[in-house]
Amino acid sequence: MVHERGDFESDLTAEEGSTFEHTFESAGTYLYYCAPHLGFGMRGAVVVE
């Protein structure tokens, strides 16, 4: 997971069951993409209210 503006990025791992945490400090919509699968259009958004 990589934030499109570079605010956060998870480690790249193939380990089953791995997790990633990020604490959002302010409300907003944070767009991200999956670095290894970007060519397949794997993108998402986190909405913080």
Image (cartoon, rainbow, N blue to C red):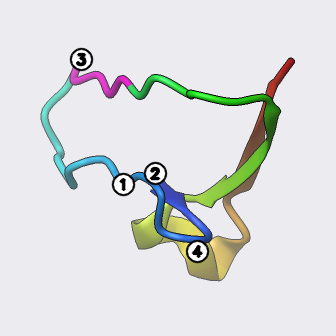
Name the amino acid, label 1: Glu
1 or 4: tag closer to the N-terminus: 1
Which type of secondary structure does the marked residue at label 1 adopt?
A: loop
Q: Is residue 38 above or below residue 13?
A: below
Badge 2 or badge 4: first in the primary sequence: 2
Q: Position of residue 35 (x, y in %)?
A: 44, 69
Amino acid tagged 4: Leu
> Does residue 47 show up magenta in the picture?
no
Q: Which quarter of the figure is the C terminus placed in?
A: top right
SS class, disc 2: loop
Tag 2: residue type? Met
Q: Which residues are magenta?
A: 17-21
Q: Is residue 31 above or below residue 46?
A: below
Cα–Cα gap, marks 1 and 2: 6 Å
Front residue (pair 32, 38): 32
Q: Which residue position holds label 1? A: 9
Place of residue 6 in the rendered image (x, y in percent of width and height, measured from the top left): 47, 68
Q: Nearer the viewer, residue 29 or 34?
A: 29
Q: Does the magenta run of residues contain 18? A: yes
Real-space Cα distance between discs 3 and 2?
A: 15 Å
In the image, what residue type sits under mark 3?
A: Gly
**Residue labelled with disc 3:** 17
Task: Give the residue at x 79% y 29%.
Answer: 27
| Mark 1–mark 2 CB contact (< 8 Å) | yes
| Residue wearing tag 2 | 1
